[in-house]
Image (tube, rainbow, N blue to C red):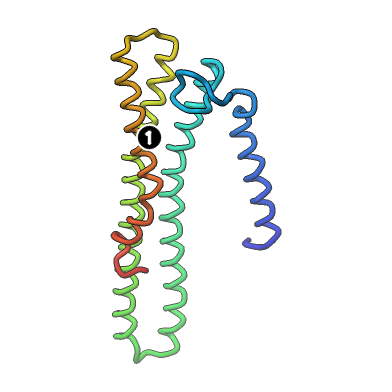
């Protein structure tokens, strides 16, 4: 299953999917727009809406995938350990006590990995949702006129949400360090 041929196929498929997902950037975005939340933003309201919705999807969809593949990886590691342990205990029966201690330690490592995975996903979710919500709000009220106070509040919430999102991108290092326990 894991061969060079499959790796090349996966790379080509990933490249095609990425091109399809970000194809709207070529014709929808224009640099140096005035009164836009970002330096490079959508020209029309439809383009802004597509950009905001695609950002929301690309922020939210990976979180359940991370959870699913992380849990599958831990389960696969456990299963492969059991297969190796069963073969080892059939050959030597005197090391049963040593194997039980090793199994407890490995089970504790698996538990730490699952906790680390859950902490990472929860923190990424908490830090990413404000920017997704703000993008959705800005897409909904894009064609409405508002006061200077409302524009200032919107800019403040956008900047705070963007800071939280940037913080989410730097969090994995601290999560691995603090929640990893003795795994690493």
Residue 11 place in picture, x, y as percent: 65, 50
Q: In the figure, residue 175 lies in which quadrant?
A: bottom left
Residue nearest the observer in this picture, 184 or 105: 184
- In the picture shown, does residue 148 fall above or below 180? above
Circle 1 sits on which residue? 162
Q: What residue sits 54% from the left and 17% below the top?
A: 46
149 horizontally vs 139: left or right:
left
Please state the horizontal and vertical placement of residue 183, each as a whole percent of the image: 35, 68
- 179 versus 148 height, above or below: below
SS state under label 1: helix
Q: Is residue 29 above or below residue 77?
A: above
Place of residue 71 in the rendered image (x, y in percent of width and height, measured from the top left): 41, 55
On the picture, is 37 further left or further right than 148?
right
Depth check: give the residue in front, 47 or 87.
Answer: 47
Q: Position of residue 181 (x, y in %)?
A: 29, 66
Residue name at image x 46 percent, y 43 percent: 62
Q: Residue at x 60, y 23 (%)?
A: 28
Q: Is residue 7 left or right of residue 60?
A: right
Mark 1 neighbour class, 10 Å CA radius: few under 14, some 14 to 19, many 20 or more = some
Residue sitting nearer the eye, 82 or 112: 112
- Vertical position of residue 17 compared to residue 33: above or below: below
Place residue 15 in its image quadrant. top right
Quadrant of the rendering where the N terminus is positioned: bottom right
Q: Residue at x 52, y 26 (%)?
A: 51
* Image quarter (top left, top right, bottom left or bottom right) of the C terminus: bottom left
């Amino acid at each position: 299953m894991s061969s060079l041929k499959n790796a090349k196929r996966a790379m080509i498929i990933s490249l095609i999917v990425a091109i399809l997902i970000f194809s709207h950037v070529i014709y929808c975005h224009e640099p140096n727009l005035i009164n836009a939340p970002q330096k490079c933003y959508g020209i029309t309201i439809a383009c802004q809406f597509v950009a905001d919705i695609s950002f929301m999807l690309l922020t939210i969809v990976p979180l359940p995938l991370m959870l699913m593949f992380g849990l599958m990886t831990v389960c696969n590691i456990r299963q492969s350990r059991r297969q190796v342990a069963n073969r080892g205990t059939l050959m030597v029966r005197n090391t049963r006590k040593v194997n039980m201690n090793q199994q407890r330690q490995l089970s504790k490592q698996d538990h730490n990995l699952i906790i680390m995975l859950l902490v990472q996903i929860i923190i990424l979710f908490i830090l990413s949702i404000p920017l997704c919500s703000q993008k959705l709000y800005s897409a909904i009220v894009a064609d409405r006129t508002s006061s200077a106070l409302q524009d200032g509040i919107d800019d403040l919430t956008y900047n705070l949400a963007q800071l939280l999102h940037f913080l989410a991108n730097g969090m994995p290092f601290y999560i691995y360090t603090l929640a990893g326990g003795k795994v690493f």
